[in-house]
Amino acid sequence: MGKRHPLILLMAGLGYAILYIPILIMIIYSFNSSRLVTVWAGWSTKWYGELIKDGQIADAAWISLVVAFWAATIGIIFGIMIGYALARMKRFKGRLLLSGMATAPIVMPEVVTGLSLLLLFISMEQLIGWPAGRGLTTVIIAHATFAMAFVAVVVQGRLSDFDVSIEEAAMDLGARQPWIFFTITLPVIMPAVIAGWLLAFTLSFDDLVIASFVSGPGSTTLPMLVFSKVRLGVTPEINALATMIVAIVAIGVVLANWFALRNQGTDKNK
Amino acid sequence: MSDPVGGKDRDAYLSIKQISKHFAEVKAVDDVSLDIRQGEFFCLLGGSGSGKSTLLRMIAGLEIATSGHIEIEGQDITAVPPWSRPVNMMFQSYALFPHMNVEKNIAYGLKQDGWPKDAMAERVNELLELVQLTGYGGRKPHQLSGGQRQRVALARALARKPKVLLLDEPLSALDKKLREETQRQLLAIQQEIGTTFIMVTHDQEEAMSIATRIGVMDHGKLVQVDTPREMYERPANRFIAGFIGQVNVFEGKVEGAGKAQKIIGVDTGGELKAAEHSELQDGSTVWIAVRPERVLLKTKSRGRAAKAANKSSGTLSDIMYLGGVTHLTVTLDGGKLVRTMISEHWDEDEAKLNIGDAVEISFEQRAAVLLDS
């Protein structure tokens, strides 16, 4: 044990190379001073400067951040509700089915999710007049639906190894629901909730397909803008933008993992 | 001496009346009645699945009884929700709130009761002192050792001055040495504050060493309630005899009636004489229980002359030296195994005992307990 076989290192190296070389190339070319993407002409950060000056991109980035923030926030509220219910209702018959259904949006093809939400929004508009047209609201609702699936999974996982006697102790000491939930349960699972929020934020931030279905004028998200610009040809500016998106997503994922790990640390108390 | 089962008491503090708890088909607790006196350190003893924890949780209100009543000081609390009951529980896992420091853990119950800040801080300090954790108030549970967490859990459960403190296997997570030390601390704290304690445990030695009375549970039933001494000396049946300490059990058949009644040993062939001898039905099967330390050993050259009522011969088949005492197994001529023990002082030449030696075992009439189930 402990001695690493050179072949294993090679396998790991190859795997990670396939995963990260394309991203690495993109990052390197984002610092290319040439206007031609494929011709290297020395280091420069000028495309990042161009990016900041580009009002269209700034607008799209702002929209994406707003959408991701609200989608993740709405997602955790509903996600906690589903996750808590699934973790606690141990003995009813359809639990496994419900549990699977709650997480289905994670594996559902985005085209299906996007199309079904679009149809829902259109029929809702016809029936009750809300949401009026497609825009920021519809994108936020659409992203919140898959965000809550992710949060539900994370929360359910955290609650499944949660020592229920902690809640019983609170009850024994004179507290009642929902007070127990807010003073005991929620603070204990908070790291998992934050991890779920960050994950949902990240996923919303880089979603293209669902947003394309349910967005309208004035709600073009950053990935949508990138995609439409790329169709006119890849520019170094886009490389710079994509690099920044990678940075934001990476920070989100790292933070989410950090919270999830911290979460395990508090479990030692059991 | 109290009743064998139930322990009815006029000065009962906590009264459990014919309580049952059924989970679907399983009778976790089956028609249990029990009276507990004020200031008592009562142990509910039983194996896993015996219903002892379920009974404790029903007293706490964490399980709802299928039928029956629970009264404290004459007041029926059966329908009172757990947050309003005048009892508190110490959980097996301690169930400390991991996101709160020691002080906040202990103060949680006081906060629910709306204590003013000053009084609360004073009470918390008082409790920290009681459990010898002064200065640890700012620590989080994960910064404490197992023994310290156990004491925080105790302090938290005692904070609201419960009429009865319930302890669910409070020492099971501690290692053996720490457990014995903690047992003493627990007993000292109980005596200092005078609160009635009900502790659930599966460890019979633990129950024997700290309880004022023990209630043994098996398959949801309360089998016997007695002081540790009575429980050991006069077990109600073979299950209790075997559960509390080690025991030799001789099966016997009742022959005759009235004054001529005899119990004939099934394995030994001879007559068995027991301490108490009420009228038994002719032909019924009974058992005679004898503790190993009450079985006397005699070899050809050594040992006490057996004037005892019951004796039998056999060969020494096993010797286990344990330091202070030596455990011996004797195979009687009929094939039955009998356990006995000798102390180091039994014989200076004790090492000369050899497996295969012809020996005689005996026990006195008053050492033999007659059991009919």
Image (cartoon, helix red, strand yellow):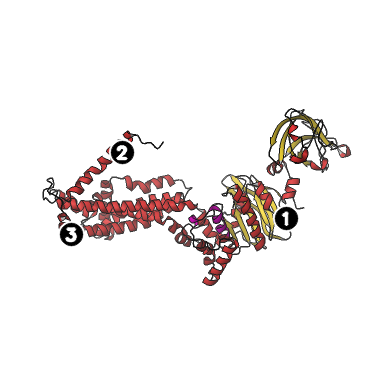
Residue A135 seen in the figure: no
Residue B8 numbered tag: 1
Residue A28 magenta: no
Relative to A257, residue B195 above or below: below
Callouts 2 and 3 close, C-beta under 8 Å: no
Q: Around disc 3, counting alpha carbons within 10 Å, would you say few (fewer than 14), some (14 to 19), or many (20 or more)?
A: few
Q: Around disc 1, counting alpha carbons within 10 Å, would you say few (fewer than 14), some (14 to 19), or many (20 or more)?
A: some
Which residue does the numbered mark 2 point to in the structure image? A12
Mark in the foreground, 2 or 3? 2
Segment colored magenta: B138-154
Residue A143 numbered tag: none
Mark in the foreground, 1 or 2? 2
Letter of the chain that mark 3 sits on in the rendering: A
Which residue does the numbered mark 3 point to in the structure image? A52
What is the x, y in percent for residue A111?
Answer: 25, 46
Q: Is residue A108 left or right of residue B60?
A: left
Callouts 1 and 2 close, C-beta under 8 Å: no
Quarter placement of the C terminus of chain B: top right
- Amino acid type for the residue under numbered disc 2: Ala
Residue B362 occupies quadrant? top right
- Amino acid type for the residue under numbered disc 3: Ile
